[in-house]
Amino acid sequence: MMLGIKKTLFLLLVCLAVASWGIGFLSFVQTVGNYRQPVISAALAPTQAIVVLTGGSERVTAGLDLLKEGRGVKLLISGVHAGVRNSEILPINSVPPELQECCLVLGRVATNTRGNAAEAQAFMEQYHYDTMRLVTANYHMPRSLLLFQSAMPDKRITPFPVQPDIVNLDSWWRWPGTFSLLLLEYHKYLFVKLSLMLGAY
């Protein structure tokens, strides 16, 4: 009798855990889907810093457009590999030399999103900035915001999500590549959130 009750409770807990995971995943996908890339115009409120996380040419292009349109004072491209030349990161003739000289910084220290947050924190402190626009892919934004806000709770961080061409959020369950990417990113997000709650980060 007692064994049967324990087994029933165990199965109930497993079902609750699976249901919670599923609801959480669907909520995560909805959050990602709600991130829409803003139109870059004079109506977009400027910030002091623009921080781009490497991982896609769309992110760098968006960051450079923000800088050229005066939506930030200085741009940090974080996570540039040490062996990568400036010309490989920046599209040809995309930024005037004078703007590159004064307002563009290539961060070569970070190797992951946590490192991006640390690199951006040092950048913000160096220039005494209080406001930042964070540029990364929409699926990467929830985890990035968690880490950046944890590293810089006193800074105002405005998300600028970019929609990568390879990610199809319309009927995402029909696209194996998009589905696996969202699933992986959701688990990374949960890991970071739990780690922050436990003080492991």
Image: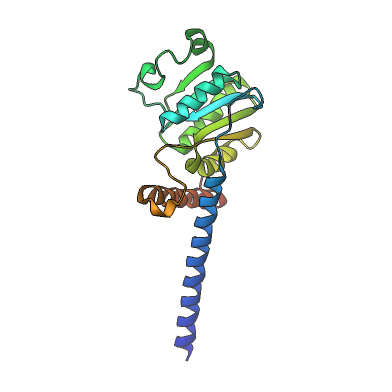
Protein image colouring: rainbow
Count of numbered circles on the image? 0
Of residues 110 and 71, the one nearer the viewer is: 71
Residue 170 lies left or right of residue 152; in this view the side is left
Identify the image quadrant of residue 173: bottom left
**x and y percentages locating residue 167 in the rendered image:** 42, 42
Q: Which residue is depicted at the point 51% across and 25% down?
A: 63
**x and y percentages locating residue 90 in the rendered image:** 41, 19
**x and y percentages locating residue 133 in the rendered image:** 58, 30
Q: Which residue is depicted at the point 57% across and 21% down?
A: 126
Of residues 201 and 15, the one nearer the viewer is: 15
- With respect to residue 196, does 53 lie above or below? above
Of residues 71 and 73, the one nearer the viewer is: 71
Of residues 175 and 58, the one nearer the viewer is: 175
- With respect to residue 93, does 29 lie above or below? below
**x and y percentages locating residue 194 in the rendered image:** 52, 53
Q: Which residue is depicted at the point 46% across and 34% down?
A: 115
Q: Residue furthest left?
A: 83
Q: Which residue is depicted at the point 47% across and 48% down?
A: 170
Q: Residue furthest top?
A: 98
- With respect to residue 156, does 99 lie above or below? above
